[in-house]
């Protein structure tokens, strides 16, 4: 039996957990981070499309189950740094409207329990911590900011510049994607082709291990225990959490702490709360609202490959441009969403989906294609939920919501890109396993009947329990989530009275 104790224990070292650890380190708070995975090794396979995408070298073998009992491989990475070790490092802020209630023709995106102004100072800090490069004044949907981006935007390569000029001719305003890579003067990023979806061999990607957890550990007040898989929490008198249980390499683990913070990712944090059920609390912990696991959102996303047969795409670092003209209004009075270039897809990566197409054909396509993600907001629904069975396996019930907006945005994007010379467009709509933007399974709010957490991510039911991963999102917005997770973790670190919480 391994016994540990700390003032604050954090479960998970991804965007939420790693960033919170950094925030607590600034306050010198004794913190233990429990991470089920190990550090992702720096090795040649980091940059091998075959190893990363075909062999799924860095993904767990674990499968989850859908409504029909079909297994699928979720978009999770159980390593130090969590999903940020492979993420695309696009780090935009959510817009002011994203924190307000939005009514769509077939769904409602609820208001957050705090405003853009409340979180703005922490966006500033998160952009500095995660070395975000960006520009202001180009993107019509940009929210106001109290400080400029800490680093200059990533320059576009010639092919992208030409594409942007064609987009401008169509009346839209392409802008620089805010990116977290180390292109500071003397920085270690080499702008390679293997960034989005790959681990960085050089440590030049702004992942939570590199930018937050590593520096936190160096400070001395934060410790990390790897291979530590938490299985459940134990509730004591007055709703307080007394200890958590798990295993380290098969050996039982018990941790006592003043405060318990879950940041295991939206599905796993909900699963932990649900798996902590007892006869006295058969619905699990922090679940008096019945909402733990519900309101699971993932974004409505589609990858598109657009081919202009007359132009060879020789770009190396493609993920520098986005178009947000349709973000607030698609032209019909309702929000649309975002269009964002993604990392350059190589023929070998296309092969993981287009299994029957010869590789030589895919390579030819890849040499003339540009790849994008079309992202729009899904809305919360109590049907869409994570549950956990007696064996601890995760089940996901998921139906698309607000999808008519996604269809409308796709239609707009198709005609825009066709008019810039892309005569062929191939689409891959995100399926249940493409859930890397998952959120919403323990929503924050002010009313304990309609939310699980308070506006500072503290459980309504258990005063020393918090959840700081994307589970707290009341709505998903239509921008990449990681910077908002980081900003809220910094807000929680700084605005929480840890003496009171962990007393
Ligand atoms: C390929 C890919 C590309 C992406 N690109 C972008 C992008 O460009 N921009 C963006 O904003 N977002 C992107 N994302 C999404 C982004 O990575 C996530 O939104 C973010 O990492 C979520 O943070 P989190 O703290 O909620 O969870 P995670 O970062 O996933 O961290 C959860 C951690 O908890 C650990 N854990 C889980 N269960 C347990 C347990 N029982 N005990 C102990 N530890 C546990 C996990 O091992 C993991 O380390 C991408 C994701 C992927 C996979």
Image (spheres, rainbow, N blue to C red):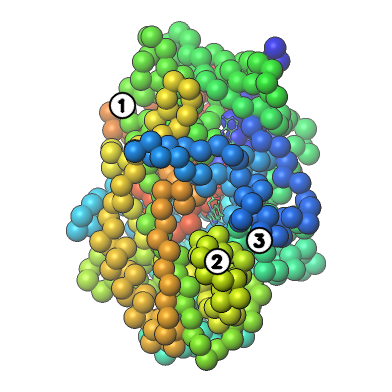
Asked if residue 239 can be seen in this view, the reply is yes
Q: Dot 1, how many residues are within 10 Å of its Cα: few (below 14), some (14-19), or many (20+)?
A: some
Among the 4 quarters of the image, the one containing residue 39: top right
The residues bearing labels 2 and 1 have C-alpha atoms spaced at a distance of 43 Å
The residues bearing labels 2 and 3 have C-alpha atoms spaced at a distance of 10 Å
Q: Dot 3, how many residues are within 10 Å of its Cα: few (below 14), some (14-19), or many (20+)?
A: many
**Residue annotated with mark 2:** 350
The total number of labels drawn is 3
Among the 4 quarters of the image, the one containing residue 255: top right
> Which numbered circle lies on residue 216?
none
At x 60%, y 71%, the residue is 359
From the viewer's perspective, tell me whether residue 18 is left or right of residue 372.
right
**Residue annotated with mark 1:** 289
**Residue annotated with mark 3:** 49
At x 47%, y 77%, the residue is 306
Give the mark nearest the N terminus, 1 or 3: 3
At x 28%, y 38%, the residue is 382
From the viewer's perspective, tell me whether residue 389 is left or right of residue 464.
left
Q: Quadrant of the C terminus?
A: top right
Asked if residue 455 can be seen in this view, the reply is no
Q: Quadrant of the N terminus?
A: top right
């Amino acid at each position: 039996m391994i016994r540990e104790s700390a003032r604050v224990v954090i479960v998970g070292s991804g965007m939420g957990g790693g960033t919170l650890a950094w925030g607590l380190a600034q306050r010198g708070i004794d913190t233990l981070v429990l991470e089920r995975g190990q550090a992702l090794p720096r090795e040649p396979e980091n940059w091998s499309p075959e190893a990363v995408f075909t062999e799924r070298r860095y993904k767990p073998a674990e499968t989850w189950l859908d409504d029909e009992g079909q297994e699928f491989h979720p978009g999770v990475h159980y390593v130090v740094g969590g999903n940020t070790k492979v993420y695309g490092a696009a780090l935009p802020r959510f817009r002011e409207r994203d924190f307000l209630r939005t009514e769509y023709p077939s769904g409602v995106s609820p208001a957050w329990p705090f405003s853009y102004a409340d979180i703005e100072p922490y966006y500033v800090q998160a952009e500095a911590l995660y070395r975000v490069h960006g520009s202001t004044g180009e993107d019509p949907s940009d929210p106001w900011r109290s400080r400029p981006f800490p680093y200059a935007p990533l320059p576009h390569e010639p092919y992208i510049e030409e594409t942007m000029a064609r987009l401008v001719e169509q009346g839209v305003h392409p802008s620089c994607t805010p990116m977290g890579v180390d292109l500071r003067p003397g920085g270690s990023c080499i702008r390679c082709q293997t960034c989005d979806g790959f681990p960085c061999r050089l440590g030049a990607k702004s992942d939570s291990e590199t930018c937050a957890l590593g520096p936190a550990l160096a400070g001395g007040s934060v410790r990390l225990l790897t291979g530590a898989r938490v299985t459940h929490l134990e509730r004591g008198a007055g709703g307080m959490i007394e200890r958590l249980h798990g295993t380290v390499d098969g050996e039982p683990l018990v941790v006592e702490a003043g405060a318990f913070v879950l940041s295991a990712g939206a599905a796993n944090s909900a699963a932990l709360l649900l798996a902590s059920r007892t006869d006295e609390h058969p619905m699990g912990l922090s679940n008096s609202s019945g909402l733990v696991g519900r309101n699971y959102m993932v974004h409505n996303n589609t990858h598109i490959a657009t081919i202009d047969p007359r132009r060879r795409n020789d770009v190396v670092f493609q993920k520098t441009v986005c178009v947000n003209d349709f973000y607030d209004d698609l032209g019909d009075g309702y929000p649309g969403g975002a269009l964002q270039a993604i990392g350059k897809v190589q023929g070998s990566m296309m092969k993981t989906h287009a299994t029957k197409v010869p590789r030589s054909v895919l390579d030819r396509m890849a040499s003339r294609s540009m790849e994008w993600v079309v992202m729009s907001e899904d809305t919360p629904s109590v049907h869409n939920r994570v549950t956990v069975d007696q064996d601890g396996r995760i089940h996901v019930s998921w139906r698309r919501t607000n999808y008519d907006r996604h269809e409308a945005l796709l239609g707009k994007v198709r005609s825009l890109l066709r008019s810039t010379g892309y005569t062929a467009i191939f689409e891959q709509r995100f399926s249940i396993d493409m859930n890397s933007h998952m959120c919403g399974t323990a929503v924050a709010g002010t009313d304990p009947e309609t939310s699980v957490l308070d506006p500072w991510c503290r459980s309504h039911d258990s005063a020393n329990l918090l959840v700081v991963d994307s589970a707290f999102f009341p709505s998903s917005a239509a921008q990449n989530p990681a910077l908002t997770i980081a900003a809220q973790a910094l807000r929680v670190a700084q605005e929480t009275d840890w003496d009171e919480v962990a007393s």
